[in-house]
Amino acid sequence: MKAEIISIGTELLLGEITDTNAPFLAAELPALGIDLHWISQVGDNQARLVKVLKRAWQRSDLILTTGGLGPTADDITREAIAEVLEERLKGDPALERELREFFARLAREMPLTNLKQATIIPAAQAIPNPSGTAPGWWVERDERIIVAMPGPPGEMQPMWHEAVLPRLRHRTGGTIIVSKTLKTFGLAEARVAEMVAPQLSSANPTLGVYAKADGIHLRLTAKAQSQEEAEAMIAQVEARLNQVLGKHIWGAGDDTLEAVVGRWLLERKLSLAVMESYTGGLLAATVSGCPEAAPYFKGGLVTGSDEARVACGVDYRLIAEHGGEGAEIAPAMAEAARSRLGAAVGVGITGVDEPGTVAAKTFGTYHIGVVTGRQRRLVTGSYPGDRARVRRWAVAAALFELSKVLAD
């Protein structure tokens, strides 16, 4: 089954809001064995929406629309679908009754404009919307399906899970598609692709390589007649990838680097403290953002000057010799944070994140120190981009190095 997603709303084209509906639906379809071929965005213009819908009707088996089901004049999804199918909109007494009951529960009078949401065409069946006033449509004709859902994610997602997904699952049957993402760090995208080249040529499971903010991700996708068979196919390829990429793989699925580090700290009953200048507190904010961080995260120190580093416990003679941005300072910062805050593990980050300084040629270079009672590591790296990107990458690099230390 070939699917197409159409996100409707002028606010999307103006950049006023980000379309989260299309990515959500795109992630849901593979498990149904449905192949997504196209995603479109169109504004609140009936003529243009009709054109997009006609094109989708010609090339797709399943068309999922979001948005344009409200009560105002610029909500034109119902009218556009009716025009494409050459059917007339008519008021539905049952839908009107549900709308009036919805407003009665809120102790509010229903505006007459909302009656628009109680209209429907003969080919459509209304999809209940327990979270709002806009019912969806399930339209089935000529071996094609249009599912129209509201734009607000808080309404669309419950409608999808409760009404649309079960119905599509019943219709598709047969092929199951299962995906799994492995996450790596420390290797360039081209290098990862080179190392996994034999798997990239596989037709089933397929393997994709993608550059992300926390490293290089590998997405495995298998098609089979059952969930168990698909998972077994993925497991075989995953085992080979683990052999090839080894410790560069730090997580899978929804894992984040900070959550992986947190699990290691909890499992080992260790605590963590950080001192950072290069990243300006971003490492501490990332670590403390985990809901389970309180038992293991002692705190963070942000040192924007050599005087602040000395005040927090870094030996002034070391700074005088190497400078506050020198590689040797990172482990000293880690040790000082560990000692000052009474933690088992310390992480320090320093480097050059200011373009235009006398050290501009090293802009983007970071130094990471990780210190425990038994280990002392120093990692130096660099990353291209603006200051914000460099800082995010340095935090990811620090968490990855910390995860390796904790795993040893």
Image: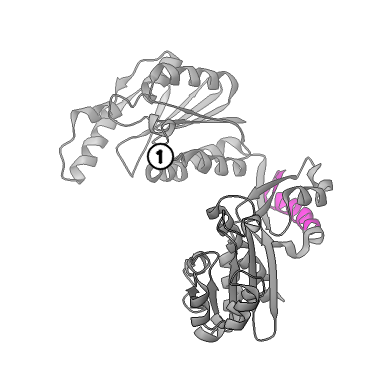
Above or below, 335 against 114 in this view is: below
Main SS, magenta region, reads helix
Q: Quadrant of the C terminus?
A: bottom right
Left or right, residue 155 beside residue 24 = left
State which quadrant residue 71 falls in.
top left
Residue in the picture at 35% in, 30% down: 69
Left or right, residue 235 beside residue 1 = right
> Which coloring applies here?
one colour
Above or below, 120 against 312 in this view is: above
Left or right, residue 139 beside residue 93 = right
Q: Position of residue 401 (x, y in %)?
A: 67, 69
Classify 10 Å Cα crowding around label 1: few (below 14), some (14-19), many (20 and above).
few
Residue that numbered label 1 is attached to: 17
What element does badge 1 sit on?
loop
Q: Position of residue 374 (x, y in %)?
A: 69, 85
Question: Which segment is the magenta one?
Answer: 219-241
**Is residue 358 visible from the viewing direction of this image?**
yes
Residue in the picture at 58% in, 56% down: 390
Q: Residue furthest right?
A: 198
Q: Identify which residue, 76 or 344, lies in the foreground.
A: 344
Q: Quadrant of the N terminus?
A: top right
Q: Identify which residue, 239 or 301, lies in the foreground.
A: 301
Disc 1 marks which amino acid? Ile
Residue in the picture at 79% in, 55% down: 236
Q: Identify which residue, 108 or 316, lies in the foreground.
A: 316
Count of picture labels: 1
Q: Position of residue 99 (x, y in %)?
A: 25, 35
Q: Identify which residue, 384 or 237, lies in the foreground.
A: 384
State which quadrant residue 235 falls in.
bottom right
